[in-house]
Image (cartoon, coloured by chain):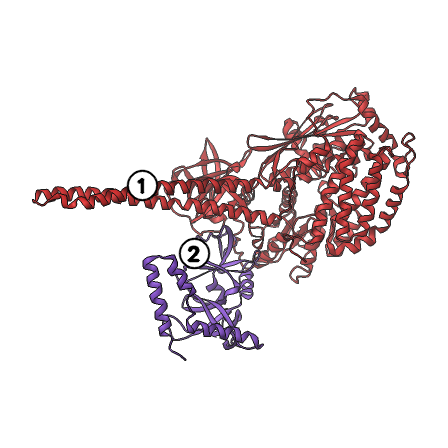
Amino acid sequence: MSDPSPATEHSNERALELRERQSLAQMRALLDRALPEEDLRANTDLVAARGDSGAARMRSVLVFDIGEERLGIDAEESHRVVQCSTVRRVPHRTNEVFAGLANIGGELTLVAAAGSALGVPAGSRQTHFVVIGQQGTRWAFAVDRVEGVRRIDASATLPPPSTVRHAADGCTKYLADIAPMDGRANGIVSVLDSARLAALFARSLA
Amino acid sequence: MSDLGGFSLHELFRAEAETHAGALSEGLVKLEGTSDAATVEPLMRAAHSIKGAARVVGLDIAVKLAHAMEDVLVAMQKGREAIQPARIDQLLKGTDLLASLASVEESAVPAWSAEHERAVDALIAELRVAPPAASAPQPAQAAAAATSTVETAAIEAPAIAPPQPTAPAPAPSAPATQARGASVRVTAEKLDRLLQLAGETMLESRRLGSLRDETLELKRDLVRLEDELDRLRADARRSGLDPASLAPARTLIESGRERVLSHLLTVEGAIRRGEETSTQLYHEVLSSRMRPFADATASLSRTVRDLARQLGKDARLEIIGEHVPVDRDVLVRLDAPLNHMLRNALDHGVETPDERRAKGKPAQATLRVEARHHAGMLRIRVSDDGRGIDLDALRERIVRTSLATGDMASTLDRQELLEFLFLPGFSTAQQVTDISGRGVGLDVVQSTAREIGGTARIDTELGRGTVFELELPITLSVIRALLVDVAGETLAFPLARIERVLQPDASEVRSVEGRMQVLVEGKSIGVIDAARVLALAETRRAATRENLVVLGSGGDHYAVAVDGLIGEEDLVVRALDPRLGKVPHLSAAAVRESGEPVLVVDAEDLLQSVRVALNEGRLRGARPMRALGARRTLRALVVDDSATVREVERQLLTRMGFEVDTAVDGLDGLHTARDSTATGALDLIISDIDMPRMNGIEFVRALRSDPRFAAVPVIVVSYKDREEDRLAGLEAGATAYLTKGAFQDSTFADTVRDLVPALSRAGRGGGEA
């Protein structure tokens, strides 16, 4: 492993200059600069890996918190992530799992209380909606914190637990070890299957 | 398959064939009336287009048929062949076959072809037989012979020339079809999505207003800073310092203020333009949902022609207001009522040509369908110049069918009497005919009007004719509503449904015999708590002043207590997510201008619950716990898409001692049935056959496949009275099959008693424990 610091320092310097002067030429220079070695290596690995079938591939996981639980969903399975807005309770329909309707991008979207559905104690902060599913099967659920999209090595994932302790396990597609960014000890994230999650939510309306 | 905007190739064929078949049908009838060869050309093109479209999707059967039809039309246009009713009949038959083919799914095409191949071939053969020369018309068809007298009447008719009241300048048919302009097909979902996005754009540009507010704030800060500086200068002078040292600061502030001011102007301009453009976009998209009234009337002249021939009558249809724009959703709902009103007019209203002549009327009757916008509503009048309705005979019939006592009937006024015609199963016809059945259909007119928030009324003049008048909302997409707060939720009551709003002192609402009442203009009105009916809160918020929304019609008023009045707003409503099923008391959802979601209250449904709640002292949706060991109340579920039929059945069953739940279609019925098992078993299910979303056959099948409902007696009550309909119902698993005429005698009640033995044990009319 070569020391990446010169490249990083270099780009930091450039970024600072850029901010100070707002010069177009500088920006171009930044974009045209040689790729930092670290990025180059990661990209090379990625391209190389595609070649031999079944070998490592990267996948993107949207990581979020519901209460104290750190959960994830394959980024490609999440339709969008937006700030929370008013959830209108629906008479005779709203229950423990079905929270109501919210206006998400002009679309009145069904909102589920993922915590109750998954058997995970929900937090009280509820900052964002994660929207999953296609038109017609779309659901939004509130999360307490969005950590962001994390890249993981697909070959390093673990199968879901064989014994189902609570509903969250039943919806788990795989487990992934994603180092927490806030220094928490446990890095294992249950990556949920959006289809199973949507089905779980839909059951509350049956 | 390549992406064709969400349509498969076959779907495009279907859409195209449907459009052209409509044009053919309409044009052929017109052609028969005018015998004008100049009107043949658009028909030729329509047949030709269907042929081309069929060729693309490889539907040889349709290619052959359309080709043969085109040949005949070409011959007519070139004058090689006379325009005769028998020939028009053949062409119409061909049009029907094409339309029927257009109505089946791609997967069902082979089955359709197998079934209709012989009919198509036979028709092609008939079409190919060159008729005798134009000078010697001769009905070639056996079928035509039976109706030849009518044809004669139809052909003679123009000679009599009935007095024409302000003829609506009818555009020549060819330019009319072209004038509608080039169009593309867009799926309804896509249009709805566009509308949502346009709405969101409008919201976003309004939110930019906060930019302006912030800039204004900045400007105010600068003014304050300037004042502060002036004070400093005064201070400096007093303490012997040179005030000039503050001059540069002052200059800076002044130039800053100028820049903020010009920035403010720019921002305001941008916001205003953004708002204007996005609002325009929004209204443009909204108006793309509007279609000309003509879309609802295209098939009517054909219906009138066919029916008149069948009945041996002679009538022509006049349509006024073809260009009046009507919302797509309203238009779709107009089909059944318009058909029923015209059928009714032809069957019961219009006399035979002989009768008419004897009365000094033109032999050809005139049916008129008029559409126009009036006071923000769409007004549709369907009138005939037939025999009118004999009010005395009607009164007699009402008494005879025990719908009212003689005393009561004699006090009914004209309008009240005519209202009876809207009851299901009520008919003034002397005999049952298969045209408009047993007076069946008129209830559809009223229930459809009510369902979309309108009204229907009848007026008549004996010997002169009858008029049906529908008053409907122009669009179902935008409603003016009162927004209220109920247990922290924003709900909307359509203004059209609100009688008045009251804000009495809380002490004016009193409990009388356990029911809340308020005195309004000397009349006592029942008060119901919205939060409890809607199951949004257990207890009411204490308030010194009540907010009451009075709903109701006629003498039947109820006040709904809400927690706060927010204000009026125009709402663009959209259907509730189908995954929610039919939600009791709600009709739609909407997004407020602020972006906040709102639920629109179904006032009719809410009223219904209020009536039940006040009459039975319980709230629907919040079922009381039954004491253990108490005798169980018998429970029935009524599933019908007609509000009128539901109500008739509900009342009959309630009178027999059932506790009755209702549902508006099969899917709703299934949900309601499943919900109700939580509180006990169902003893009886009544279902209609023709319903949207899930029909009765599918509903009964679904019930039977669920062990919880496998043994519950199911009575199907339908308008369909053919043997095969009955068998289909019974095969699906219905216990009994009745026609809606069963309400007129005791058949319905007898069947119920037979199927629910517990009913007689519980004692007649006293099922309540």
Q: Which mark is residue A10?
A: none
Q: Same chain for the residues at labels 2 and 1, yes or no?
A: no
Q: Which residue is mark 2?
A: A84
Q: Which residue is mark 1?
A: B261
Residue toward you, B599 or B144: B144
Q: Quadrant of the C terminus of chain A?
A: bottom right
Mark 2 and 1 residues: CB-CB less than 8 Å, in contact?
Answer: no
Distance CA(mark 2)–CA(mark 1) = 35 Å
Residue sticking out furthest to the left: B240
The answer to whether any part of residue B587 appears in the image is no
Asked whether, in this view, residue B430 is left or right of residue A123, the answer is right
Q: Which chain is red?
A: B
Mark 2 burial class by Cα count in 10 Å: few <14, some 14-19, many 20+: some
Q: Which chain is purple?
A: A
Subunit bearing disc 1:
B
The answer to whether any part of residue A47 appears in the image is yes
The quadrant in which residue B85 appears is: top right
Q: Please state which amino acid type lies under the numbered disc 1.
A: Leu
Q: Where is residue A48 shown, x and y percent of the image?
A: 53, 75
